[in-house]
Image (cartoon, rainbow, N blue to C red):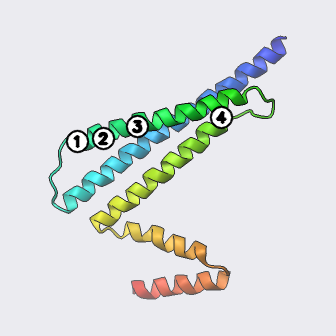
Amino acid sequence: MEKYVGFITQDLRAGVAIIFACLVLIVFACLLDMWTGIDAARANKEKICSRPLRKTGTKIVDYYRLVMFFILIDILGLCFPWYNLPYGAVIGTAGVLFVEGFSVVENLRKKKSHAADVADMAAKIVECLTPEEAQKLIKKIKEDKK
């Protein structure tokens, strides 16, 4: 019996560590979004007030609620022997990071930063059907840079 309890405890510790890492990543993503938003506002000479901080706090709480829903799905998954990681929390966090990533790119565009162009170029390279098309696109990018 101790063997099974030890296995379940070890499995839960790993799951809790993964969930904690997901929650920390959400906070960092939201703070990064706030940082780029404030930076873009400064670049455009817009007035900066304390509202972005409150908005960021609200976003973090809302994202935590969403991830908590996925954690409930993970708890239900503990009924199955093959469900050994908090897949729901990881998928929910990936979705949040995806949304916040788009927001960061949007803020960089608003700032008129060239870092936003990197995401567009990477998307164009990924859309190429053959390696030759990708190489032609990379050559064209290098020529435009010169």
C-alpha span from label 4 to label 3: 20 Å
C-alpha span from label 3 to label 1: 14 Å
Left or right? Give the position of 81 relative to 120: right
Query: Which residue in the protein does label 3 denote?
Result: 60
Q: Nearer the viewer, residue 106 or 42?
A: 106
Amino acid bearing label 3: Ile
Q: Measuring from the top left, give residue 45's x and y in whole percent.
A: 15, 60
Query: Which residue in the protein does label 4 denote?
Result: 86
10 Å crowding of disc 3: few (<14), some (14-19), many (20+): many
Residue 114 falls in which quadrant of the image?
Answer: bottom left
Amino acid bearing label 2: Lys
Amino acid bearing label 1: Arg
* Circle 2 SS class: helix
* Circle 3 SS class: helix
Query: Which residue in the protein does label 1 denote?
Result: 51
Please identify the quadrant where the N terminus is shown.
top right
Query: Which residue in the protein does label 2 denote?
Result: 55
